[in-house]
Amino acid sequence: MKSSNNNRRKFMATTLQSVGLTALGGLLWSGYCDEAKSSPLVLRPPGAIPEEQFIDVCIKCGLCAEACVNRESNKNRDGTQREGTLKIAKGGDHKLIGTPFFVPREVPCYMCDDIPCVPVCPSEALDMESLLNEKRELDINRAKMGLAVVHKESCIAYWGLQCDACYRACPLLDEALTLEYQKNARTGKHAFLLPVVHSDICTGCGLCEKACVTEKPAIFVLPRKYSTGKVGDHYVKGWDIKDQQRVGDRKIDEIETHDERSKQKPSDYLNRGIEY
Amino acid sequence: MKKFKYLLLRRVTQIGLMFLYFSANAYGWHILEGTFGSSKLFGFIPLADPYTTLQVLSAGFLIGADVLIGALLITLFYMIVGGRAFCSWVCPINMVTDLSNWLRRKLKLDKEEVNYRFLKRRTRYWIMVLGLIVSAIVGIAAFEVFSPITIMQRGIIFGFGAGISVIVAIFLFDLFGVKNGWCGHLCPLGAFYSIIGKKSIIRVKHDHEVCTNCMECKAVCPENQVLKMINRESISVTDGECTNCGRCIDVCREDALSFAIRDFNKNKKS
C-alpha cells in the first residue's frame, strides 16, 4: 500500500513537472515567435497575400528567390549573373527568417512580364490569381508590393532644381508617377516639376527609390498598410453617383448619427477638457 | 574501408543533396530546387516537409496543393521505405552533431555518465506537440522560426548571416552539454520522423549467433536505446528512433549487423 502510494506520488510529480516545463517552454517559444514575426516594414514579392497570413503560409522554400536570380533577363552583357531582387531573410536581417523580401535601394523589382517568382510558389503565399488580368494572363502591373512615398523636404525638385530621375525610372511613367508643374514664386521665372505618386497604379517596384539622386532617397517604397490612409464609411462623395448610392434612398433628414455624445448638449461636450 | 562504408555513403548523399540544392540557386539547375520546407524534384515533382506543413495548417491557414502533395509523398516514402533515414542521410545538422559526437569520444568527455534530470529522450515528442500548439497560438510555423536544420540548409544555399550562431550553438551543446543532445533529445523533426517511420521496411538486423558482445555498436550508436536486442536475440531493430545510419553495421567486426527488409512475421510474434 505504501509503495503504491509512493508510485502514485512519483507519477503525479513527474506529470506535474512535464506539464510545467512544457508550459514554460510554450510561453518562451510563443514570446519569441511573436517578436520574430513582427517586422512590419518588409516588402514582399509580387502577389503576396496579406502579411499576417504570408508569414505563416510561406513555407520558406526560397523557390521565388531562386527563380528571380536565375531568370534570363538577369544577366549582364558579358553573360555573368546579376544579384537577384528577392532575398531570403537570414539571421541578422531582422525579418522572419526564411521568408523572401526585397530592398529597392539595393535591387528593385524590375517587373518582369512573365513574373518568374510567382508561379513557382508551392504554398500559394504568392497568389497568382491576384496578378491575372481579364484575359487570364499574368500582368505584373497588377502587383501591389508597396507604395512609393515622396518626402518633400529632401526632394530637390521641391527646391526648384530640375530633377526627374524617379519619373524617368518609373516603369508606369505618367501613370503611377506624374510630374506636376507649378510656378516657382521664389525666382519668379522658373517652374517646379514635382513628382506625384498615384497610389491606385503604383506597384511598389522601387525603381524610383533606386534612381533617386539624394543621399538617402527622398522617394521610397513602404508597405501599403503603412503608406495609405482610410477614410471610413461615414464620408460620402456627394458628386460621385456610385459613391452616393451607398446612402441609398434615404433623405438627408433621415440620416442621423447616434452615439454616446448625442445624449448631451453640445455646450456640455464642446468645452470639455479645456482649462481657462 | 569496410569500416566506413555507410558513413561515406551517407556523407556523399548529404553533401550531394546539399550541392544540388545549392546549384539550383547558384547555377539555375532544375534537379532539386527549394529547401526542405518545400522542394521541386526535376522541376516538377513537389516535395514538402510534413511537420512544417502541419505547423502551417495548425496556425490556421490553408496552404497550396503542391505543398500538400509534396508532404504526402515525403510521408509515404519514410513511412514505407526509409524510416527515420532523413536524420542521418539527408539532414545537414547530422554532420555537425556527428562531429560533436566524434570529438566527445576523442576527448573522452563521456567518461562519467551524467544524469540529465530534465532532459530525457522523450522531450522531443513534447517539443513536437508543443510546436504545433505554439503555431496555433502565434499564427506562424513556430519551429521554422529557429529550426537549425533549415537555417543551415538556407545558409548553404543563400548565405548564413547571423544564422551560423544557431549551428555553433548546436555544436557546442552536443559537445560540452548533452551527448546527442539536439538530435537525440530535442529535435521535433526527428521525433516526427521517428513516429511516421516506425513501420518502415528497411531495418537493421541483428544476428545473435555471431555477436561477440563487444558493444562497439552501442558505443557508436546515436540512439543506442534501440539496440536493446544486442546479446539477447536475433531480431531487427524495430524502434522508430533508429535513424538507419548504419554506423553499427560499419563498426561491427563480426558482421552481426546488416540492413535487411523487415521480417513482418517474426516481429509480430515478438
Image: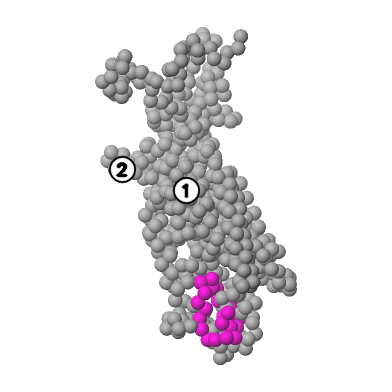
x, y (%) of residue A139?
35, 40
Which of the image's four quarters has the C terminus of chain A? top right
Query: The disc labelled 2 sits on which kind of residue?
Result: Glu
- The answer to whether residue A60 shows anywhere in this view is no
Quadrant for residue A168, please give it.
top left
Kindly identify the residue that appears in the image at 38 percent across and 56 percent down: B66
Q: Which residue is mark 1?
A: A56
Q: Residues within 10 Å of mark 2 (few under 14, many from 20)?
A: few
The correct choice, above or below, for A51 with respect to B30 in the image is: above
* Region rendered in magenta: B228-252
Q: Which residue is mark 2?
A: A137
x, y (%) of residue A169?
46, 32
* Badge 2 and badge 1 in a common chain: yes
The correct choice, above or below, for B61 with respect to B268 in the image is: above
Q: Residue furthest bottom?
A: B209
Magenta region, mostly helix, strand or loop? loop
Chain of the residue displaying label 2 = A
- Viewer-side label of 2, 1: 1
Q: Which mark is residue B205?
A: none
* Front residue of this view, candidates B199 and B81: B199
Kindly identify the residue that appears in the image at 44 percent across and 31 percent down: A170
Kindly identify the residue that appears in the image at 38 percent across and 52 percent down: B64
x, y (%) of residue A43?
49, 39
